[in-house]
Image (cartoon, rainbow, N blue to C red):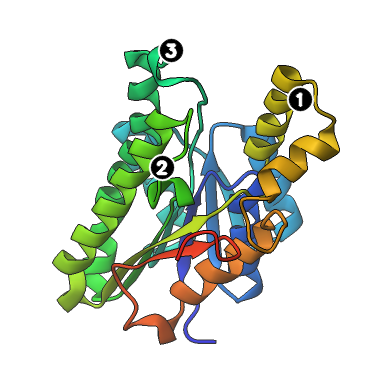
Amino acid sequence: MGLARHALVTGGGRGIGAAIAAALVAAGHRVTITGRDAARLTSVAEVLGENCQALGMDVTERTSVDAALALARQRFGAIGILVNNAGQAASAPFMKTDAAVLQDMLAVNLGGVFNCTQSVLPDMMAANWGRIVNVASTAGLRGYAYVSAYSAAKHGVIGLTRSLALELASKGITVNAVCPGYTETDIVKEAIANIMAKTARSETQARAELAKSNPQGRLVQAEEVADGVLWLASEGAISITGQAIAVAGGEVM
């Protein structure tokens, strides 16, 4: 299994983030989950037990990030694994996507990765060991209509992942991204609701519309994404860096 580490998971209160936290705790790591919904974070941490703590944090605000990470270290020590999972998606035609939406998508999906990574890196540099896993999206590897701002931000995450991987390659630190396709999360539930509202399709039809982009004909499960993150965070993944691994049933190759 390797050494137990302190892992930080942003957006850890639900969906993919909660599944990643559960996988890391099960593997023996100490896990800090962060987010803006304190009640939800606390409920997840209580289920995961004494090796998980919950802290409020806004990834778009560097002062918030630095303060939360300082508290996280007080209990669990230096951070060796960072999972940048916090994210948001906005859907609209390009001509109805205003500058504020673009800035929001960049601030959360790309700026959050930047802020958290800069705040954590001193721990990893001092240890000459670290694992950074960015939860991007297949939208970071290809284009999708009606999510131009989100896709642009996730493409930025992939670029940051690749560049930072090269910068840190000789320092025992790997930087990778996992890129889920449509996954059974709150974001997808919102997408299904939007399809139903705009097209008068049933929930089953709306779900099938999303699932058909996956050659396996199904939605990805959050636990499947967590399994990929757990591997990238392991001791044995030292030679894997700068990669953007699609977890999408063959949708992107």
Q: What residue type is labelled 3?
A: Lys
Task: Say which of 104 and 74 sits in front.
Answer: 104
Judged left or right of residue 221, residue 138 is left
Residue designated by label 1: 196
Q: Where is residue 231 in the image (x, y as percent from the top left)?
A: 50, 76
For marks 3 and 1 on the same chain, the one whose residue lies earlier in the sequence: 3
At mark 3, the secondary structure is: helix
- State if disc 1 and disc 3 touch (CB < 8 Å): no
Q: Which amino acid type is marked by label 1?
A: Met
Instruction: Please report whichever mark, 1 or 2, sits nearer to the chain's N-terminal start.
Output: 2
Residue 229 position in % (x across, y down): 51, 67
Left or right of residue 51: residue 97: left
Question: Quick one: SS at disc 2?
Answer: loop
Quarter where residue 38 is shown: top right
Q: In this view, does 79 lie to the left or right of 206?
A: left
Expressed as whole percent of the image width and height from the top left, the position of residue 119 reads 28, 49
Q: How far apart are marks 1 and 2 (CA)?
A: 23 Å
Q: Residue at 54% across / 70% down in the picture?
A: 228
Q: Mark 3 points at which residue?
A: 96
| Residue underneath mark 2 | 143
| Label 1 CA crowd tier, 10 Å (few <14, some 14–19, many 20+) | some
Dot 2 amino acid type: Gly
